[in-house]
Amino acid sequence: MYVELPFDEIQVNTTKRRVSYFYDQDVGNYFYGTGHCMKPHRIRMTHSLIMNYELYKKMEIYRAQPATNLELTQFHTDEYIDFIDRVTPDNLHLFEREQVIFNVGDDCPVFDGLGEFCKISCGGSMEGAARINNGSADIAINYAGGLHHAKKSEASGFCYLNDIVLGIIELLRVHPRVLYIDTDVHHGDGVEEAFYTNDRVMTCSFHKFGEFFPGTGNLSDIGIGKGKYYSVNVPLRDGIDDASYKSIFEPIIAAIVEWYQPSAIVLQCGGDSLSGDRLGPFNLSMRGHANNVNFVRSLGIPFMVLGGGGYTIRNVARTWAFETGICNGLLLPKELPYNGYYEYFAPTYELDVRSSNMNNANSKEYLDRILTQIISNLDHTKHAPSVQMNEVPRDLEGLDEDLDEDMNESMDTKGGSQRARDKRVEVEGEFYDDDEKDQGEKNISNGNGIQLTNHELTEIAELNNRVQI
Ligand SMILES: [Zn+2]
C-alpha cells in the first residue's frame, strides 16, 4: 500500500485564495524565562520576514481582539481561567495549591503577562475561525496559535490554553465536520482528547512516538464511543525525511477528505518537526514541511494555519514565512530580504532549511504497516456523519454583551459584538500601500449562516467533561 515517491519541487496552484493573517505586535514581548525553549519572539521574526517579503500586498492583516474570559470557558473551566487571568510571578505564592492542580511550574512557568499572551493566541484562532465561518476568508493564519497540549483545566508542554479547540468549537457552529491535522513533532493530545468521543471532528496527528513527550498517540488510539474511528494517529520514528513524510501524509489526508468530507480544516504547523530542531528528532526540510500546507491548500477546502512548537527559531521563522507564501500562491525566493532580525539567519542568509544526513528509522515496511492499518480504520468512516444544522438566534448562550442597532447585519459567531472585535488593525502601517488595501473597519456578516442548535452546543460542552483517556 505504501508507495514512496521522490520528493519533487513544490508546485503551487496560483489560484487566488483570500488569506486573513492574524498578528499582534505584543506577542514577541512575552518571555517564558531564561533558558526556556519556547520563545514567542519567533512569531515576531516570522512576521518580519512576511512583511519584508511584501506578503501584506497579497493578504489581509488583522490584530484580533484578545479572547475574553467568557469565551475561553467554552472549553476551559471557570476556575482554571480565573487562575490564568490572575496569577503573576509576584503573587504566585498565593496559589500554591493551584500551581499543582493546574500543572504550572517548570515546563509551563508563570511569567509576566501570561494571561494576555494566552488571550492573544486564542483570540487569533477564534477570529480566524469566524472569518472562515462567514466566508470572508479561504485561509486564516495565526502563528501565535497551535498550542495543542493544553487541557481543559491543565497546562501542559508549554501550552496553557487550547486555542485550537476553541477555534474548532467556533467552526462547528457552521461546519458539520471539521478535520484537524497536527504536524508538530509531538502528539496533538489536547485536541484529540477534547474531541475523542465526537464524530464531528476528525483529528489526525503525525508525530514522533516512543519515549517522547507526551507519550500518547499510538496507532491503536482511534477514538471511543461515537468518536470511534474519528481519531487518527500516525506514530513515527526518528529521522523521517521529506519523501517518506509526503508519502504517508498525502494518502492519509486524501482518504480522510474523500470519506469524511470535512468542510473546514485546521492545520497545526508546529515547526519542531523540522530538521535540526532543538527538541524534535525528525528530518524534514523547509519544503518537506511546507508540502503539508501546499497539499491541504490544493484540496480547495477552507482552512486555518496555526503555529505550534518549534525550537530552532531561525528555522521556524523561515518555514512559517515560506508557508505563508504558499498560502498566497507564491514560492518565496531564496534570498532573504533585509529584515529586523537579519543576523539570526547567518551564515547563509537564505530562506531554506535543509535536511541532514541522519538515519531514517522509518522503514518502508513500517510505514506500509501503519498506512495499511489507518486506511483500514478509515474504511469505517466512509459514510460521513450528517448533522442536523439549524439557524439559531445570535444571542445564543447569552454571550452577547454589546448588541446594537446593527445586530442584524453583524452576525457574530464568537459571542461578543463582532463589530467591536473585528476592527481591522494595521500592523506596522508603514508597510502599507494605500492603493492596495482598502482601509477602515470591516464588518463580518454571517448572512444566513447556519449555526448549531442549543442541543448541539450542549453536546460539545458535555464532551469536554468526559473522562481523561
Ligand atoms: Zn511540539
Image (cartoon, rainbow, N blue to C red):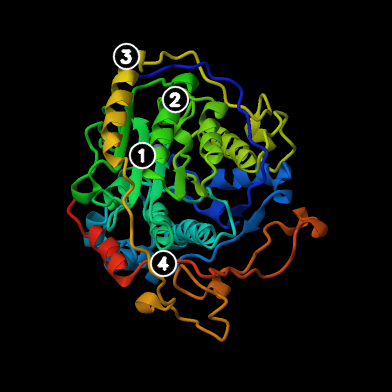
Q: Name the residue beneath numbered marker 2.
A: 245
Q: Which mark is residue 365?
A: 3
Vertical position of residue 400 compared to residue 152: above or below:
below
The amino acid type found where label 2 is placed reads Tyr
Q: CA distance from mark 4 to mark 1?
A: 25 Å
**SS for dot 3:** helix
Q: CA distance from mark 1 to mark 2?
A: 14 Å
Q: CA distance from mark 3 to mark 2?
A: 14 Å
For the residues bearing labels 4 and 1, Cβ distance under 8 angstroms: no
For the residues bearing labels 3 and 4, Cβ distance under 8 angstroms: no
Residue 376 position in % (x across, y down) = 27, 30
Indicate which label's residue lies in the foreground, 4 or 2: 4
Vertical position of residue 89 compared to residue 230: above or below:
below
Q: Which quarter of the rendering shows the N terminus?
A: top left
| Ligand 1 placement by image quarter | top left
Q: Residue at x 74, y 66 (%)?
A: 439
Around disc 1, counting alpha carbons within 10 Å, would you say few (fewer than 14), some (14 to 19), or many (20 or more)?
A: many
